[in-house]
Amino acid sequence: MQFVFSFDYPHEVAPMNLKHLLGGKGANLAEMTSVLKLPVPHGFTISTDACRAYIDDGWPSGLTIEIDRALAELEELMGKHLGDPGDPLLVSVRSGAQFSMPGMMDTVLNLGLNDVSVEGLAAQTNDPRFAYDSYRRFIAMYARIVQGIESSEFDRLLDAAKELSGVNSDGEIPAELLRYLVGAYKELVAQETGHPFPQDPKVQIRGAIEAVFGSWNGPRAIAYREREGIDHRLGTAVNVQAMVFGNRDDNSGTGVGFTRDPATGEQGVYGDFLVNAQGEDVVAGVRITEPLAELETHFPEVFHQLMDIFERLELHYRDMCDVEFTVEQGKLWMLQTRVGKRTGIAALRMAVAMTSDPGIKLSREEALLRISPDHLDQMLHPQFATTKIEVLTTGLGASPGAAVGKVYFTSNDAVRAHEQGEEVILVRKETSPDDVHGMLASNGILTSRGGLVSHAAVVARGWGKPAVVGADELVFENGFAKIGDVELHEGDEISIDGSTGTVTLGRLPLEAAEPPQELELLLQWADEISSGHMSVRANADSGPDAEVARRFGAKGIGLCRTEHMFLAEDRLPIVRRMILADSPADEEQALEELRLAQREDFLAILRVMDGLPVTIRLLDPPLHEFLPDIEALLIKESNQTLSEEDEKLLEAAKTWREFNPMLGVRGVRLGVLKPGLYTMQVRALLEAAMDLKRSGGEPHVEVMIPLTISKAELAYAHAWVEEALAELGADDGLDVLFGTMIETPRAALLAMEIAEIAEFFSFGTNDLTQLTYGFSRDDVEGKLMPIYLAQGLLPSNPFKVVDAEGVIELVNIAAKRGRSTRPTIKLGVCGEHGGDPESIASFVKIGLDYVSCSPYRVPIARLAVAQSLVREGASL
Ligand code: PEP
Ligand code: MG
């Protein structure tokens, strides 16, 4: 196997498509050299194959010979030799993985300098100061990266040199002292390693290459890959390249540039440069840079050459590029180019603009593929206006967007603070239906327990409120909370980022969400592609939520969790009365009140979604969720402070208490146990639909039964609908479908029987995941899941990305078996996976009819559906 490829190696395909082999940087250097023929300093790339081999079995045999050959070729091309006392060749050794991992791995510059060649550099440049400054920088960098010596040791010596010569900046230290400093640096290395600083350039290069290979598995790099979902097995390539010097004289310089503005997408000249400086001076911000447009005044010819290169790069890559360049004694050198990172708004604007750019001619399908879900998240939710974030702790990013506010630990306190005009972050161990009012009053929600489909996560997402859940370093004490040594007290300000899961102490500046007008156009293209294949609906439980959903382009409601309607302040007491009823008459009375309330709720939703399908799910959670916390009641009991009402509630709470409520009386089982409840809901719904129809509307109602396990059970539930329809004398023209969620593996397997009754299936992939794995959806993501992920026992969190082997297989089986009985059966997904782009791709493959997700997620799902279809070959 060949490990080393020079930048002008004649690959069989365009090198920019060989990132897996050459890394991003290497692939683009080769593309610039061999295809675009740009002025790139010569060099070669050691492949990712070599890195993987090194990680597995140590230095690969044959690699040294290949490197020696490549170095000899490089010397030949440059007309210079490593370690030459007259005019030495110096090289850089840089990492470059397939996916960009900025700053996560190592780089060593100025290799080839030693006690002899430094004199050659001094003579060539006629600048001993420059030569010795380069040498001392190289020793410090090599010692830190390759030999693991703390850089503070070198800084100490540097500071002493400045003090000795009475100057303030590094650049003013005289040459003689720099020569002395080099000696001191070398002595330090000898002391720390027990060996003299390596003088042989080949030894230096080998050391640097091994360090770069090793940095692939450094803690920073591992953490970065985990966050970005990059495979740990890929390895990095290493680029060895002849050095050019932007800090040679005032006829030299260095800079970075973008072919369009990476923040806004506008066309123009964007970037920074510095005269007489090295690349790291620009990046590190030690000197104030000049805007790239000013390059024209300093180096007019170079400027025009660079602008010409920008144009060629854009036409070649058909995208915005960023570049690093150096001017050495008036000659322009391109050091790097790549398709540039950009903000969401810039991504969108550029993609749309490039479809009408005559040179680039981006197709609409390509434009759609240029936008990532993260880009849309940035546009749809507020973000922090800074990247300088000191992370206090991290949990699961459960509902995207950033929020700041004062900490409150109970929902009642949150509401009170909100009413006094404060911005609130509700901080809880977990949330329950009891906390809904507190969540509503908060700008953001932070919990120490729970996962991506926990109550807090699902509710927050539904409202587009930022939430971080399962931050398990957060410990609750009496009246305050702790994260490590840091105490959080009521009223303390924190900032949370529901996209990344980070929590920060204090207020970070926020940037409002402002989608540009191009978004509508892009989503229109997306819908055109998806039309006839898959549509996107929303999970919404109220008229206002439905309005948000429709505004974001939802084509109906795929899940209305009716239990959320029971939680409003004016409803909960009625529900409790129903549960506590002493007689059938009392229960009847409470149900009647609920019916009237629900009828209004349903009407509001149906009105907003007039003409579109609305799936109403009958009550799902166990009844005890509507009762106060049993622990709190028991404390009151032991303190003898129970009111008469409390006593009844405690009794009911004890009656309805289950060891395993998620496997207990919930879903359709509740209906079987309390049929009056479900009949009431069906009646309220059908009445609302008839009301709307009478007033000229066009309701399309879908009644959905949760947690079904068999045909017999579903037939039993179907009778309630039939009964209500007959009772109401509903006219035949009312469009009512009857269907079920597929949430249990049994229902998936028996789908052919269930489809005899059900006119639609909606896959409740939250419960289906919970029940397929036997993982409690409320607990497993706290302690267990991170270990499973770190150990590679799971490829990803199955509550976020649908399990592509087990759960998807059940969906596939159910879809096939359901269709075998009822070919026209409608198939959708309403679990949280319905808003996850990777999961959506799996659902598209199975050919489901719709996905349903929270209203704020609808644009992302619309994009993801179209992207999946384009990847499967669909076009406009
Ligand atoms: C599901 O289980 O996927 C679902 C949508 O229902 P819920 O999350 O309300 O249990
Ligand atoms: Mg469910």
Image: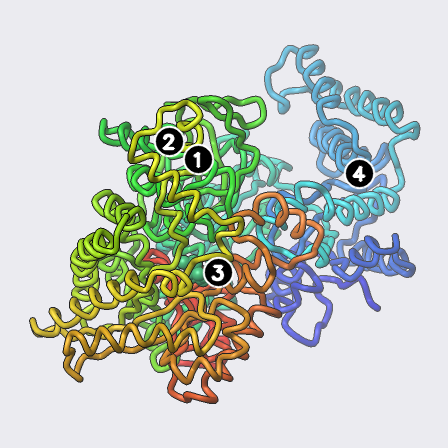
Q: Which residue is mark 1?
A: 428
Give amino acid for label 3: Asn
Counting from the top left corner in percent of width and height, residue 709 is at 48, 71
Which callout, 3 or 1, points at the residue further toward the start of the chain? Answer: 1
Q: Which is more toward the observer, 673 or 248? A: 673
Ligand 1 contact, mark 3 (Cβ < 8 Å): yes
Which callout, 3 or 4, points at the residue further toward the start of the chain? Answer: 4
Please, what secondary structure does the residue beneath circle 2 have? loop
- The span from disc 3 to disc 4 (Cα, nearest Å) is 48 Å
Q: Which is more toward the observer, 8 or 530? A: 530
Q: Which residue is mark 4?
A: 146
Which callout, 1 or 2, points at the residue further toward the start of the chain? Answer: 2
- The span from disc 1 to disc 4 (Cα, nearest Å) is 46 Å
Give amino acid for label 1: Arg
Left or right: 450 as drawn, with respect to 421: right
Q: Which residue is mark 3?
A: 766
Q: Which residue is mark 2?
A: 410
